[in-house]
């Protein structure tokens, strides 16, 4: 898609996601007719952002853009990356949030279940049923610890996300019991 002059002026001739000035192009933010300016590197991994997660650290800055089309793309990318902490910091007007959510693909493979087969959903509370060493965090999640307000791991029905000892970690559902 070619870039019109107004779009280049709005973006200050930079990628509106990462700030690069290399290989710029217009990118349509469906389902609306709005477009943003992105670079070749962003374009290469925008459909599958987990292929180059480090590149998307730039979203920490672009999430504060006042341009709705940029906000929508940042919301969608952070959602695909499972960056819930950043999503929680974003404020989107209702119509912008609806636009952002309308473009997210709902990939519900199979339901997420605890060790007893109970269905788990976003926001549930669970109890850890076995001491679990947490790799990279230097502590053990103790048996009997309650994890409140869980989040589903993107595209993985065998894991959830939750806070234990103030740290957001992934937990295997085989070691959890719904409260």
Image (cartoon, rainbow, N blue to C red):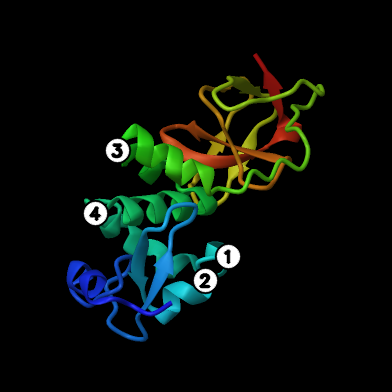
On-image quarter of the C terminus: top right
- Look at the numbered disc 4 and give the secondary structure of its residue: loop
Q: Secondary structure at mark 1?
A: loop
Sequence-first disc among 1 and 3: 1
- Residue at the disc numbered 3: 91
Residue on which the image places disc 2:
45
Residue that protrudes farthest toward the bottom in the picture: 23
Q: Is residue 17 left or right of residue 65?
A: right
Whether pointer 2 and pointer 3 mark residues with C-beta atoms closer than 8 Å, the reply is no
Q: Position of residue 11 (x, y in %)?
A: 22, 69
Position of the N terminus by quadrant? bottom left
Task: Give above or below for 95 relative to 58.
Answer: above
Task: Verify CB contact (< 8 Å) between mark 3 and mark 4.
Answer: no
Question: Residue 42, located in which quarter of the rendered image?
Answer: bottom left
Residue that badge 4 annotates: 65
Q: Residue at x 41, y 58 (%)?
A: 33
Q: Position of residue 147 (x, y in %)?
A: 54, 25
Q: What whole-number distance in Å separates the C-alpha atoms at marks 1 and 2?
A: 5 Å
Q: Secondary structure at mark 3?
A: loop
């Amino acid at each position: 898609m070619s870039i019109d002059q107004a779009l280049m002026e709005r973006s200050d001739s930079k990628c509106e996601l990462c700030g690069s000035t290399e290989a710029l192009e217009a990118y349509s933010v469906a389902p609306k007719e709005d477009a943003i300016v992105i670079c070749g590197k962003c374009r290469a991994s925008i459909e599958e952002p987990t292929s180059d997660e480090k590149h998307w650290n730039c979203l920490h800055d672009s999430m504060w853009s006042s341009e709705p089309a940029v906000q929508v793309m940042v919301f969608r990318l952070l959602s695909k990356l499972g960056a819930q902490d950043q999503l929680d910091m974003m404020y989107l007007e209702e119509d912008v949030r609806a636009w952002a959510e309308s473009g997210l693909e709902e990939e519900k493979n199979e339901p997420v279940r605890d060790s007893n087969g109970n269905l788990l959903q976003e926001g549930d509370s669970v109890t850890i049923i076995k001491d679990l060493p947490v790799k990279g965090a230097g502590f053990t999640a103790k048996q009997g610890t309650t994890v409140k307000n869980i989040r589903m791991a993107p595209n993985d029905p065998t894991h959830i996300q939750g806070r234990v000892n103030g740290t957001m970690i992934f937990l295997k559902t085989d070691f959890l019991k719904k409260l």
